[in-house]
């Protein structure tokens, strides 16, 4: 069956049932996509399990982040409802009960993540407050009728869910048959509440909810509702006997900002040894940039992460080793010869080999078994490196994040990127932040040190016992300083006092100068000495442990590095691709005839390129006749060299046809459109491009 | 109808005609004394088949048009009945029989919207101030704490609201029907105090019937008149309520309450908030029993002005006080607006500040961003993304039309060899390009008289005058402004102006005012280039005049090719660079299994890049998808809709029989089915997701939601340069795209084949077939009418400014050909044509309606020939 037709645009193909494959496994496609199918099954399994872990981790993070917010909301709902129920006669309360209690939830700009939040919110509400929750979305409700229909559908459905299990005489009415109006909603509500009131309180489900549960309506993305619809809805619902006034009583709730969300995610996914898979600096930078400059969406960030995983396992045959250390060691033993060869081809491994003595070099390059042993060791090294890297990074972050102007960035992810990129201690920013750190005051320094101690103690690295000891020693020394500080203080106080004495301007200047002089010449105080020591110690830690990952042998196994692939698939620029194809077809069609130097185009290029190039020379309107003539001039010049059939009618028609085709293609691409302004003219829709 | 009643009516009809001008006022005074007349007229109006109806309507209109106000009111009392009969007949689609009522209503409307001088009336309403006492409230009763008189005065609550202008209406359409009727009700309400009781009854009857007809509540009523549902408009209902409110307190207690209930019932069903609010307010303020009926004839609306002072009942109801009733309505509107203001935001959390503080740190580290992007661009060499944005998106420099030919000849002259034409790189050229045309002329000037060369003393204006006519003379391809509407008076001068305005750039004017040597000028241009880009843009777009040559395709003696010949010709032309293109395609084909993998992992795939991706996707389909259920959608197909896509899923994939009320319902059904049955899998291939028909917001939303289902795998292609603008963040995340660049360089044969391209002759085979199809189902008379129009259009086909056939002329012709007997029948027929898009109407400058058949002449000729064969 062909898919060209002049009468329809949709074609369904259904294979006969016996031919139909029973949903082919995704793994098979993974295998097919890889020609060397050696470990692909294992690789795919690893990939999937890794992704599953990461997914559950992120979901958990999301849940925790939302918990606080949801708790607040729930308590708000309880409060507002109970007030209403007590039916106090006090004036203020009565005023309040006439209002519709409303919670405004500010979620920030990343619209795409909100779906999840709302879904879990309505779940939480359903579990804790009331079974009657309706979630309305702007796109479902172009008019008040649709809104009511959706509202009632959701409310009544959930009521049916509650009752169908234990009620015998409840008539199931389909949503379409009920006429959508407030009266039917009210009568439904009264019916329901009566029923739940009369029921025995032994039923667990009901007792969890309040007596006569409130109806909660969630408007998702309130701004995109048409104002009319909302006004009408509030107008109508204020006709409910409970609340006559159309006033809304709004309380605002603020969710966590998406950036904090991202930080948590990065913390949980990247700055941990839990997952063997790592992102290289460029890749991470691309992901973060997409987040910051395009969508603020954590969902998309995770999607990008998923793509990284898939790409990594797909393109890197050695990624089979990208798993937990124990497992990886086992897998090393079963590596095939070709995989060993793959390892030998890794640039980082080659570097490693070159640094060895010659016998070992030979052994590494020839004996698979020896190689495997070394690999195991190297993998272990890599693991240890990761274990140490994270706490030291956090420790450094404690220092840099409190410096003025944040030379190394405020967020830990920036620091992480900087450390991955190259040796961080060689950068200017690091230098300046160390300088700033040398000027920290004591109390800050002490709290930082304490934080560092906490970080190291809680970390899993084994080498940090000494570090902790040393840090504790520093702390003790600082405490000792307290005692010794008295004298110094006395000194400074005296000079201070001198300043405060009443003097004339000349004397003041003199004393100030003296003070300055004394300070310059003064030997470093004990505190300052200690401070230098501390900073040097930290500097040492950094130099030892924060080596960029791509200096490590075998980092290719763990680190996904092809940022270009990621960018191409996630943040593509179709316009640039079109532009390149039209301006420089040689980029794609490797034919010598098309080769040209910058900015120009050969006259043998495909028709559309020539037509495009010609149209760039025009203003807002293009005369088709001129265009056609120019085109045929170019084309004839080329044809003329081949055959001397001087402009026979046949040829002419063909050129005409080619021109028509190319012009309509440009129209399809959106460069031009027909214009009524003048006969036989088209309008240009783009500017520039030459 | 009884003979006596008939007699009364006939007498009434005849006596007014004989009436001399002077006696009209005395006649008006006596009219209401004729007791049997009014009921008889009601009977006539209620019966659409009565032969007296037409003269009666005519007579009523005559009365209304007369200057005597009492006669006017006499007509007005029948208004509720007329509206009811009209709406009933409209609902029952019995349009033929209510022509005269329609005409009467329209006539009254058109008389009322204009004042004596023929200007449009604007009604103004004053919204009462809360601080000043009115019949509705007493400031002292509200004022307790915050509402002191002074505070209220500051709120400036006295506002004058003006009604919209009401345009003249010639016909009723579904859009304007209730606008007109609401206005008529407003007129009625403003004269309601003068109406007799029978009119109130008729008003209440109308209200009840309109609201209840066709709904279950109708069965509770004692009247059993059959009528379908009548569409109602909230504004109209509010007007109705205003009248009913008056009627309730003026003798129609029972009927009034009934109609009030009915209106509430209807408003609840329709979820009309305005009438609901008004009606509920009315209902809640009703007294327990009917107002004292003893003072019959005294129209009383009791108002408690203030509880503190002794009760005053206002007996005088003036039109002014009635108008205040309407304030209620306006007041409601205003109050509603205020609710938005009074929304109390309790804690406007300060966190906003905190956020912005944080974000300032991170947002716009553009440098690093660009740096990273740049790095990546270098990484991905070979797919051609190493082009900076500036090159692609820069503004257009003003060009002149000779430029294209110039480039063409340049390209032609050096075959096989490339010519550098990069303007950005050779500033010399850019300088020339905006100027060169003038250069040309000025060169000529130079040749003629060396003295006239660019001398710094020559004023710019003068030079312009010198240069411009020259251009006009010298240039071979006659230039003219393409400003079609304006006439070509003062030809020379204007042309000169356009030449200059079309070409000059700010840079040039600057250069001209301080004419330096050529070299410094070019330098200056280069410096100014960036800053001038914006100005140039506005310069280029400031005037609607564009300078291009006037040549048309007709002069080329080239026949327009039609689709088939075009196709044949293209087949003859060899495909250039076939091997390279093949290689390119093979590269893409390697990706097939990767696509499948990623589709299964929850991503969807979108292809972009130059060249038709149809063949590639076809190949993908035949090689990979053969054994699974899949749907191919040709987005470029001119009449593709989301509906048809959804239909083919529900009908063919899910094998569901039945229809859906809206695409959203259908989508919901599909999503439900796919979620329930995990074994269902569907691959969707969409060629040109960005096509004209699918690029709408709603269609994209639906497709995005569809694609977000885990067991629907979408792979689509886009071609338009602005395609990514279709999707906002929400849609993009639903789509979950992975982008793949697949530049194929294959010609878009299939995509451009659907008769929408520019140069291809519109063979109109589709239009023709639909024409014949529709016409075959019409009556012979209707076909004749259409034929007349078609013939007339063909007779005028050589007249380029043919506006169409005016309605009046058309009517005349149709009458002469015995095709219609009244203009109403013709109008009804035309409506049918218009519904089928067979004709188009447009209003000429003089307000006359012109009719056109929007089909090109050759198709029309074909059609007529075919018709002749059939007959």
Image (spheres, grey):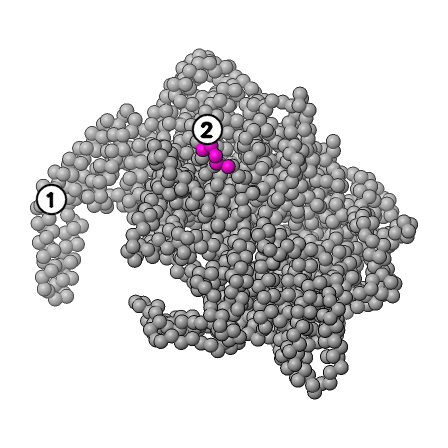
A342 vs B234, nearest the viewer: B234
User: Is A534 placed left or right of A265 in the picture?
Assistant: left
Residue A102 at x, y = what percent? 39, 50
Split into 4 quadrants, where in the image is the N terminus of chain B?
bottom right
Disc 2 target residue: A51
Same chain check for tags 1 and 2: yes
Residue B484 in view in this figure: no
CA–CA distance in space, label 1 to label 2? 56 Å
Residue A414 at x, y = what percent? 38, 41
Q: Judge whether B293 appears above or below A362 on screen.
A: below
B564 vs B149, nearest the viewer: B149
Q: Residues within 10 Å of mark 2 (few under 14, many from 20)?
A: some
| Disc 1 element | helix
Q: Residue at x 88, y 50 (%)?
A: B866
Disc 1 target residue: A485
Q: Residue furthest bottom?
A: B22
Residue B46, quarter of picture: bottom right
Residue A255 at x, y = what percent? 37, 45
- Callout count: 2
The chain containing the residue under callout 2 comes to A
Q: Residue at x 58, y 42 (%)?
A: B665
| Disc 2 element | helix
Q: Which residues are magenta?
A: A167-171
| Nearer to us: label 1 or label 2 | 2
């Amino acid at each position: 069956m062909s898919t060209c037709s002049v009468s329809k645009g949709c074609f369904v193909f259904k294979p006969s049932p016996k031919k139909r494959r029973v949903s082919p496994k995704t793994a098979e496609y993974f295998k097919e996509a890889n020609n060397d199918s050696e470990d692909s099954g294992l690789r795919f399994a690893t990939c999937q399990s890794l992704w599953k872990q990461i997914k559950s981790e992120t979901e958990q993070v999301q849940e925790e982040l939302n918990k606080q917010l949801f708790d607040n909301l729930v308590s708000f709902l309880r409060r507002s409802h109970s007030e209403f129920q007590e039916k106090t006669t006090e004036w203020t309360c009565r005023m309040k009960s006439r209002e519709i209690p409303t919670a405004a939830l500010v979620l920030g700009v990343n619209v795409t993540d909100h779906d999840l939040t709302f879904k879990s919110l309505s779940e939480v509400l359903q579990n804790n407050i009331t079974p009657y929750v309706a979630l309305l979305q702007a796109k479902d409700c172009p008019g008040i009728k649709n809104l009511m229909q959706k509202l009632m559908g959701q409310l009544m459905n959930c009521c049916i869910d509650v009752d169908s299990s234990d009620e015998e005489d409840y008539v199931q009415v389909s949503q379409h048959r009920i006429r959508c109006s407030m009266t039917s909603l009210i009568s439904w509500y009264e019916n329901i509440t009566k029923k739940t009131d009369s029921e025995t309180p032994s039923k667990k489900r009901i007792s969890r909810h309040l007596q006569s549960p409130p109806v909660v309506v969630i408007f998702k993305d309130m701004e995109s509702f048409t104002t009319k619809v909302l006004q009408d809805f509030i107008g109508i619902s204020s006709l409910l006997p409970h609340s006559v006034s159309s006033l809304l009583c709004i309380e605002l709730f603020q969710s966590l900002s998406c950036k904090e969300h991202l930080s948590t995610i990065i913390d949980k996914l990247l700055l941990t040894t839990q997952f063997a898979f790592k992102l290289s600096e460029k890749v991470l930078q691309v992901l973060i940039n997409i987040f910051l400059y395009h969508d603020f969406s954590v969902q998309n960030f995770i999607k990008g992460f998923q793509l990284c995983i898939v790409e990594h396992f797909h393109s890197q045959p050695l990624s089979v080793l990208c798993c937990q250390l124990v497992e990886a060691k086992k897998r090393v033993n079963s590596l095939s010869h070709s995989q060993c060869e793959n390892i030998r081809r890794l640039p980082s491994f080659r570097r490693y080999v070159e640094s060895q003595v010659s016998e070992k070099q030979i052994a590494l390059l020839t004996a698979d078994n020896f190689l495997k042993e070394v690999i195991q060791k190297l993998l272990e090294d890599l693991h240890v490196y990761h274990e140490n890297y994270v706490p030291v990074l956090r420790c450094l972050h404690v220092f840099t994040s409190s410096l003025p102007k944040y030379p190394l960035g405020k967020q830990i992810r920036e620091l992480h990127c900087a450390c991955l990129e190259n040796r961080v201690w060689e950068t200017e920013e690091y230098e300046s932040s160390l300088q700033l750190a040398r000027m920290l005051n004591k109390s800050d320094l002490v709290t930082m040190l304490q934080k560092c101690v906490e970080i190291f103690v809680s970390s899993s690295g084994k080498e940090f016992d000494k570090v902790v000891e040393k840090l504790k020693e520093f702390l003790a020394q600082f405490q000792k300083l307290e005692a010794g500080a008295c004298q110094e203080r006395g000194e400074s106080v005296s000079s201070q006092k001198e300043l405060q004495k009443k003097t004339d301007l000349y004397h003041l200047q003199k004393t100030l100068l003296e003070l300055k002089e004394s300070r310059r010449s003064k030997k470093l105080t004990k505190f300052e000495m200690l401070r230098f020591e501390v900073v040097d110690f930290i500097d040492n830690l950094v130099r030892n442990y924060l080596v960029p990952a791509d200096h490590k042998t075998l980092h290719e196994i763990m680190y996904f590095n092809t940022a270009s692939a990621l960018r191409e698939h996630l943040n593509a620029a179709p316009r640039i691709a079109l532009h390149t194809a039209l301006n420089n077809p040689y980029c794609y069609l490797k034919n010598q005839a098309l080769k040209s130097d910058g900015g120009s185009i050969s006259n043998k290029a495909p028709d559309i390129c020539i037509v495009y190039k010609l149209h760039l020379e025009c203003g807002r309107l293009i005369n088709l006749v001129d265009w056609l003539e120019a085109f045929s001039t170019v084309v004839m010049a080329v044809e003329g060299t081949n055959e001397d059939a001087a402009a026979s009618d046949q040829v002419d028609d063909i050129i005409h046809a080619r021109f028509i085709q190319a012009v309509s293609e440009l129209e399809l691409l959106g460069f031009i459109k027909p214009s009524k302004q003048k006969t036989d003219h088209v309008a240009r829709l783009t500017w520039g491009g030459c | 109808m009884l003979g006596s009643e008939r007699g009364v009516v006939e007498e009434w009809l005849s006596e007014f005609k004989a009436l001399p001008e002077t006696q009209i006022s005395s006649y008006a005074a006596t009219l209401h004394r004729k007791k049997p007349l009014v009921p008889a007229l009601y009977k006539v109006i209620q019966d659409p088949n009565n032969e007296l109806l037409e003269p009666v309507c005519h007579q009523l209109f005559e009365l209304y048009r007369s200057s005597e106000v009492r006669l006017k009111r006499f007509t007005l009392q029948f208004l509720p009945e007329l509206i009811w009969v009209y709406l009933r007949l409209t609902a029952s689609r019995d349009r033929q029989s209510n022509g005269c009522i329609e005409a009467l209503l329209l006539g009254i409307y058109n008389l009322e919207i204009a004042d004596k001088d023929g200007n449009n009336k604007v009604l103004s309403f004053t919204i009462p101030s809360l601080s000043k006492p009115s019949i509705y409230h007493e400031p002292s009763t509200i004022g307790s704490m915050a509402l002191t008189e002074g505070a209220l005065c500051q709120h400036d609550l006295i506002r004058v609201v003006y009604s919209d202008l009401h345009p003249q209406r010639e016909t009723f359409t579904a859009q304007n029907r209730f606008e007109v009727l609401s206005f008529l009700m407003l007129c009625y309400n403003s004269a309601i105090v003068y109406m007799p009781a029978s009119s109130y009854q008729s008003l209440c009857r109308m209200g009840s019937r309109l609201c209840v007809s066709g709904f279950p509540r109708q069965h509770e009523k004692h009247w059993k008149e059959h009528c379908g549902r009548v569409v109602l408009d909230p504004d109209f209902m509010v007007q109705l309520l205003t009248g009913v409110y008056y009627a309730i307190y003026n003798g129609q207690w029972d009927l009034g309450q009934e109609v009030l209930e009915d209106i509430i019932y209807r408003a609840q069903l329709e979820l009309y908030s305005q009438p609901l609010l008004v009606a509920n307010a009315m209902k809640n303020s009703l007294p327990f029993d009917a107002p004292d009926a003893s003072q019959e004839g005294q129209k009383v609306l009791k108002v408690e002005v203030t509880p503190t002072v002794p009760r005053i009942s206002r007996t005088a109801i003036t039109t002014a006080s009635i108008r205040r009733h309407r304030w209620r309505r306006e007041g409601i509107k205003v109050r509603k607006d205020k609710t938005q203001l009074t929304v109390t935001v309790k804690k406007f959390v300060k966190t906003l500040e905190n956020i912005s503080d944080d974000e300032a740190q991170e947002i716009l580290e553009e440098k690093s961003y660009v740096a990273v992007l740049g790095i990546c661009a270098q990484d991905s060499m070979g797919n051609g993304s190493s082009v900076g944005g500036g090159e692609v998106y820069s503004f257009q420099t003003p060009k002149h039309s000779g430029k294209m030919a110039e480039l063409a000849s340049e390209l032609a002259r050096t075959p096989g060899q490339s010519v550098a034409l990069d303007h950005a790189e050779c500033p010399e050229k850019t300088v020339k390009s905006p100027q060169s045309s003038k250069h040309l002329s000025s060169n000529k000037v130079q040749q003629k008289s060396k003295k006239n060369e660019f001398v710094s003393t020559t004023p710019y204006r003068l030079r312009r005058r010198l240069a411009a006519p020259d251009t006009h003379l010298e240039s071979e391809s006659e230039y003219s402004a393409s400003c079609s509407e304006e006439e070509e008076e003062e030809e020379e001068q204007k042309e000169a102006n356009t030449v200059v305005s079309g070409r000059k750039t700010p840079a040039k004017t600057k250069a001209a005012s301080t004419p330096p040597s050529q070299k410094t000028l070019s330098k200056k241009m280069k410096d100014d280039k960036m800053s001038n880009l914006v100005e140039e843009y506005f310069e280029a777009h400031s005037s609607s005049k564009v300078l291009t040559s006037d040549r048309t395709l007709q002069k080329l003696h080239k026949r327009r090719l039609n689709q088939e010949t075009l196709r044949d010709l293209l087949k003859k032309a060899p495909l250039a660079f076939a091997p390279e293109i093949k290689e390119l395609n093979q590269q893409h084909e390697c990706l097939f299994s990767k696509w499948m993998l990623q589709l299964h992992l929850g991503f969807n795939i979108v292809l972009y890049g130059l060249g038709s991706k149809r063949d590639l996707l076809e190949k993908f389909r035949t090689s990979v998808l053969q054994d699974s259920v899949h749907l191919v959608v040709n987005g470029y197909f001119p009449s593709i809709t989301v509906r048809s896509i959804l239909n083919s899923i529900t009908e063919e994939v899910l094998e569901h029989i039945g229809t859906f009320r809206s695409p959203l319902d259908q989508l919901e059904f599909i999503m439900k089915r796919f979620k329930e049955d995990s074994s269902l899998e569907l691959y969707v291939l969409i060629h040109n997701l960005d096509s004209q028909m699918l690029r709408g917001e709603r269609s994209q939303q639906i497709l995005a939601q569809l694609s977000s289902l885990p067991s629907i795998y979408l792979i689509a292609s886009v071609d338009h340069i602005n395609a990514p603008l279709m999707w906002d963040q929400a849609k993009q995340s639903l789509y979950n795209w992975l982008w793949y660049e697949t530049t194929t360089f294959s010609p878009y044969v299939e995509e451009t084949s659907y008769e929408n391209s520019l140069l291809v002759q519109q063979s109109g085979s589709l239009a023709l077939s639909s024409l014949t199809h529709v016409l075959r189902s019409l009556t012979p008379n209707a076909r004749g009418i259409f034929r007349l129009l078609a013939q007339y259009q063909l007779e005028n086909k050589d007249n380029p400014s043919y506006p169409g056939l005016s309605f009046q002329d058309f009517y005349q012709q149709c009458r002469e050909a015995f095709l219609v007997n009244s203009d109403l029948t013709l109008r009804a027929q035309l409506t049918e044509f218009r519904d089928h898009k067979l004709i188009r109407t447009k209003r000429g400058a003089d307000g006359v309606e012109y009719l056109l058949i929007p089909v090109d002449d050759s198709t029309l000729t074909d059609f007529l020939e075919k018709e002749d064969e059939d007959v």
